[in-house]
Image (tube, grey):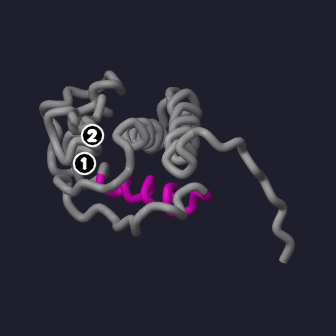
Amino acid sequence: MAESVSPISPHIGDGLTSPLSVLTNRALRRYGEWNASTVDAETQSLFIDLANEIVDDVRGHPYWNNFPELEYYVSSEDVRPVPDPVMIAGLLAKFAVNQGSNKWEKYENDYYQRLNQHLYYGATGGSMPLNLQVVRR
């Protein structure tokens, strides 16, 4: 049986997720105002902070309950079990907000759509209908 590979970076990582440095370069390429090959240490540090904000978003998402503990990024070469499309969309959204760009709204909508979609399919296999319950405390 063939090993599943990431549609984003099939040649890197465990076949499912990529290192943050690769995700950063892909996000900057899509953003369109940066040369991804000239990312300096300051920019990479910024993306570690932005990636950790995404980690917080994923940890707080209701569909993340069935997955392993998610640790913060400490290096640009770290790999976390968050799907590449979610990380790239999140980095784009958070970077656009950080830059004060008018692109933030489009990127943020895309990010939350991808986050919800990928985590829903990861938690349910995509075969279960949504089941919402009101919890009173």
* Chief SS of the magenta region: helix
Q: Residue at x 28, y 35 (%)?
A: 6
Image marks 1 and 2: residues in contact by CB distance under 8 Å: yes
Residue that label 2 marks: 23
Q: Residues within 10 Å of mark 2 (few under 14, many from 20)?
A: many
Total marks in image = 2
Q: Is residue 90 above or below residue 60?
A: above
Q: Residues within 10 Å of mark 1 (few under 14, many from 20)?
A: many
Span of residues in magenta? 48-62
Q: Residue at x 28, y 45 (%)?
A: 17
> At which x and y percent is residue 89?
43, 36
Q: Residue at x 54, y 64 (%)?
A: 65
Q: Residue at x 30, y 56 (%)?
A: 80
Per the image, is 50 magenta? yes
Q: Quadrant of residue 16?
A: top left
Q: Is residue 24 visible?
A: no
Using the numbered discs, state the Cα–Cα distance from disc 1 to disc 2 in whole angstroms.
5 Å
For badge 1, the amino acid type reads: Leu
- Give the SS element for disc 1: helix
Q: Quadrant of residue 4?
A: top left
Q: Give the residue furthest to the top.
A: 32
> At which x and y percent is residue 115?
52, 43
> At which x and y percent is residue 103?
50, 27
> At which x and y percent is residue 54?
44, 53
